[in-house]
Amino acid sequence: MEQLPQLQELAQQVRRDIVRMVHAINSGHPGGSLGCTEFFVAMYGSIMDYKRGSFHMDGHGEDLFFLSNGHISPVWYSVLARHGFFDVDELSSFRKINSRLQGHPATHEGLPGVRVASGSLGQGLSVAVGAAQSKKLNGDSNLVYSLHGDGELQEGQIWEAAMYAAAHRIDNLISTVDYNGRQIDGDVDEVLPLGNLAAKWKAFGWEVLEEEEGNSIPAIMQVMAKAKELSGKGKPVMVLLKTEMGHGVDFMMGTHKWHGVAPNDEQLERALEQNPETTLGDY
């Protein structure tokens, strides 16, 4: 597993990858991708137990990860490539015709690291619950992780899956909400308020952890360690991770407007200036 300086350098490189990928095709979702960079870097660099250098769809004997808010695929693709799931150069094919790196992750082209098509919001928790229950039935002690957008919690299927997970004591599942308070049409509280989200998940029978510093790798590592300690005790675990959409690029922060807008040439240069080249190198 990588050490903190390596993880921080990787996060900087991933941000470069994200803005370059979205700019090159003039399409994609940079805001949420940038906001979740530290989360993905910490998950794949330190937190998850998975088989590096090989990928099998069944995932037996390793932790599984499911991205429910699949529109933030740029950050996931970058982190997967930077951890050897596929060649880093393939990032240049993002969203192109016949590419394995579609705007929303898909499985028909067999991209290593992706076990389910996602991006149709609300479905990922159901998939993660099913995978976690399968691990229990198969005597597999590894964990299942999932990531969701806060706006995605406005989908009813999320809460059906939440009830099922608690009722069936799916305690090998750790889910996280990217709690940035923004969605495509504006602030979540203006579109459809979620109320007291921690109280909601607790009422649905989940253990709940809250982390205010969702763009801090050490903070993420600490809260996920606590989540692991809570697993196996009869309840699924939910982590509410406060992040900043567009984090690391000043003009993309503090607004929902970069949810799904690509930077132009000048904006790309500004974003790259704020995230200088690393020893890892651009694709």
Image (cartoon, helix red, strand yellow):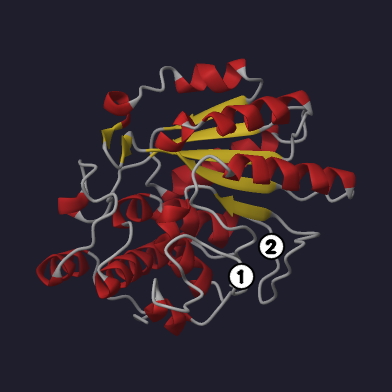
Q: Point out the frontmost of discs 1 and 2.
A: 1
Residue drawn where x is 30% and y is 67% of the image: 22
Q: Residue 228: give its label.
A: none
**Which kind of residue does numbered mark 2 sit on?**
Tyr
For disc 2, the marked residue is 50
Measured along the vertical axis of the image, is residue 165 above or below residue 81?
Answer: above
Q: Is residue 276 something that shows in the picture?
A: yes
Residue 237 location, quadrant: top right
Query: Residue 161 placed where, x, y %?
Result: 65, 32
Which quadrant holds the N terminus?
bottom right
Comparing 205 with 117, the one in front is 117
Query: Residue 63 placed where, x, y %?
Result: 70, 55
Residue drawn where x is 81% and y is 47% of the image: 134
Comparing 159 with 241, the one in front is 159
The 10 Å Cα crowd at callout 1, few under 14, some 14 to 19, many 20 or more, is few
Comparing 160 with 168, the one in front is 160
Measured along the vertical axis of the image, is residue 86 above or below residue 134?
Answer: below
Locate residue 267 relative to residue 51 in the image: left or right.
Answer: left
For disc 1, the marked residue is 108
Which quadrant holds the C terminus?
bottom left
Query: Residue 28 placed where, x, y %?
Result: 33, 61
Measured along the vertical axis of the image, is residue 161 above or below residue 28?
Answer: above
Residue 273 location, quadrant: bottom left
Q: Give the residue at the far left of this rendering.
A: 266
Q: Earlier in the sequence, mark 1 or mark 2?
A: 2
**Which kind of residue does numbered mark 1 sit on?**
His
Q: Secondary structure at mark 2?
A: loop
Query: Residue 188 placed where, x, y %?
Result: 32, 30
Residue drawn where x is 27% and y is 25% of the image: 190
Q: How far separated are the C-alphas under marks 1 and 2?
A: 22 Å
Q: Give the residue at the far front of this rendering.
A: 97
Q: Is residue 280 something that shows in the picture?
A: no
